[in-house]
Image (cartoon, rainbow, N blue to C red):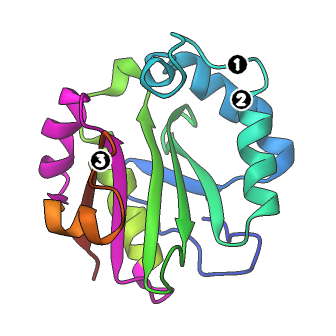
């Protein structure tokens, strides 16, 4: 178990996973997970693999933005990094966190890794006073439309999208309560 850079409580290990918040010098480890889960980037950047410096860019963005972090999830028995999560706590509201990334390496998909890693993150965020977790995906992302409800997210209504000024965007927002 490790603490985040601000000294917040550590992630509790799950039955299979250990999670740790990353620092800028962890870019090589994050880049390896990005490369292994390159299909994630097709929907994000239109390219089937990450940029060579994608992890460095992600971690620089985290270092420059209070509340924004990335964690790696590794198998406790082997130490193999199998997933990455990215979030922005307290944005855009103090009790809300935005989930910007939840990717699992292909050979571990369908084994509950995403659910386990997300559960650890949710407990950690709830312990820091975050009451809701929100994410946004392309309305064309059919896989996310199946996975997010299975992870406890509910699609936000058109009225909620309109209130946020997103009624014409090709973005579906999903949210779930924590705690």
Residue at point 53%, 73% (across, down): 91
Q: Which numbered circle lies on residue 168? A: 3
Mark 1 lies on residue: 51
Q: Is residue 7 visible?
A: yes
Q: CA distance from mark 3 to mark 2?
A: 29 Å
Mark 2 lies on residue: 54
**Going by the picture, which residue comes out furthest to the right?**
25
Q: Secondary structure at mark 2?
A: helix
Of badges 3 and 2, nearer the viewer stands 3
| Mark 3 vs 2, N-terminal side | 2
Q: Secondary structure at mark 3?
A: loop
Within 10 Å of the Cα at label 2, are there few (<14), some (14-19), or many (20+) other Cα atoms?
A: some
What stretch of residues is rendered in magenta? 126-155
Residue at point 80%, 36% (across, down): 56
Of badges 3 and 1, nearer the viewer stands 3
Question: Looking at the image, do the residues carrying marks 1 and 2 touch, with CB atoms under 8 Å apart?
Answer: yes
Q: Position of residue 179 (x, y in %)?
A: 27, 83
């Amino acid at each position: 178990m490790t603490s985040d850079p601000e000294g917040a409580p550590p992630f509790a290990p799950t039955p299979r996973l250990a999670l740790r918040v990353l620092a800028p010098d962890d870019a090589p480890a994050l880049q390896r997970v990005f490369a292994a889960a390159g299909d994630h980037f097709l929907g994000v950047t239109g390219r089937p693999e990450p940029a060579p410096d994608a992890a460095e860019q992600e971690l620089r963005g985290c270092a420059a933005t209070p509340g924004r972090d990335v964690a790696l999830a590794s198998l406790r028995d082997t130490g193999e990094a199998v997933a990455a999560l990215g979030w922005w706590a307290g944005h855009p509201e103090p009790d809300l966190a935005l989930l910007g990334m939840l990717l699992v390496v292909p050979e571990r998909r369908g084994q509950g890794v995403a659910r386990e890693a997300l559960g650890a993150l949710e407990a950690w965020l709830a312990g820091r006073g975050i009451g809701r977790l929100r994410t946004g995906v392309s309305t064309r992302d059919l896989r996310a439309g199946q996975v997010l409800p299975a992870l406890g997210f509910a699609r936000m209504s058109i009225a909620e999208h309109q209130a946020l000024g997103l009624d014409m965007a090709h973005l579906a927002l999903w949210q779930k309560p924590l705690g």
